Image: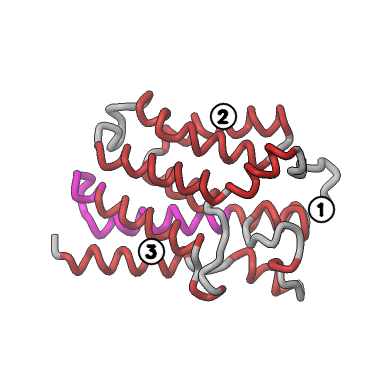
Amino acid sequence: MEIFIYLVVAAGAFLLGSIPTGYLVARSRGMDIRQHGSGNIGATNIFRTLGKPLGIFVFFADALKGAMAVELAFTLGGEQNQEAAWLGIIAAVAVIGGHNYTPWLGFRGGKGIATSAGVLLALMPLAVAIIATVWGVVFFTTRYVSLASISAAAALPLSLVLLWGTRYGSSPPLLGFAVVISGLAIWRHRTNIERLRAGTESRFDRKTKS
């Protein structure tokens, strides 16, 4: 496959990921979300600041960016073989990078959890069930969104090991990719980790406005 296709996939996925959904939704309500709550443009801050419906919308919109980027890469790659897997991985890395470091906001974006979820749903759907279960158990036990997200990220590489042999599950590049995005997601939560250790992290409030 020509290098041109890889470049097109990477550039297209990055630009798709760079669409700052949360920022645009907040702007439509006359608010710069970067000046409210945690200052993050992701779904969690939208949820807490603007309410449940908009938070859910932003989460699914950001997840859709990830899934679309990977599926379009698979379409360009043709058959689901090792070469298509590499295209999917390139698209996944680029779309998450675009979301986390959007050039439209000075290369400061979200933490990539929703976009990563969309990527994973397209790349390794069976693994999503495992990490979603981990996220749910941790969240409903502790009420910390950040801790649930960190735990789900850490569980991703393990889920691929458990599902070895499924769709691209026997692909070392895919496992390597899982390790990389897991590490990136945890790194993007480093300030949350500091607050969790200090006991100052905010718990999710069931009374969040809707």
For the residue marked with disc 3, what is the amino acid? Answer: Ala
The residue carrying mark 1 is: 210
Instruction: Identify the element where label 2 is drawn.
Output: helix
Q: Residue furthest left?
A: 1
Horizontally, is 132 left or right of 24 in the view? left
The residue carrying mark 2 is: 133
Q: 84 or 202, which lies in front?
A: 202
Q: CA distance from mark 3 to mark 2?
A: 28 Å
- Between disc 3 and disc 1, the foreground one is 3
Rendered residue at 34%/57% (across/down): 91
For the residue marked with disc 1, what is the amino acid? Answer: Ser
Q: 30 or 36, which lies in front?
A: 36
The vertical placement of 120 against 210, above or below, is: above
Q: Which residues are magenta?
A: 60-85
Main SS of the magenta part reads helix
Q: Earlier in the sequence, mark 3 or mark 1?
A: 3
Q: Quadrant of the N terminus?
A: bottom left
- What is the total number of numbered labels drawn onto the structure image? 3
Q: Residue furthest top?
A: 162
Q: Residues within 10 Å of mark 3 (few under 14, many from 20)?
A: many
Horizontally, is 62 left or right of 161 in the view? right
Residue 98 in the magenta stretch? The answer is no
Q: Quadrant of residue 9?
A: bottom left
The residue carrying mark 3 is: 13
Instruction: Identify the element where label 1 is drawn.
Output: loop
Q: Earlier in the sequence, mark 3 or mark 2?
A: 3
- Residue 84, horizontal then vertical, whole percent: 23, 50
Q: Earlier in the sequence, mark 1 or mark 2?
A: 2
Rendered residue at 49%/29% (across/down): 130
Residue 70 in the magenta stretch? The answer is yes
- Residue 113, horizontal then vertical, whole percent: 54, 49
- Residue 45, horizontal then vertical, whole percent: 70, 56
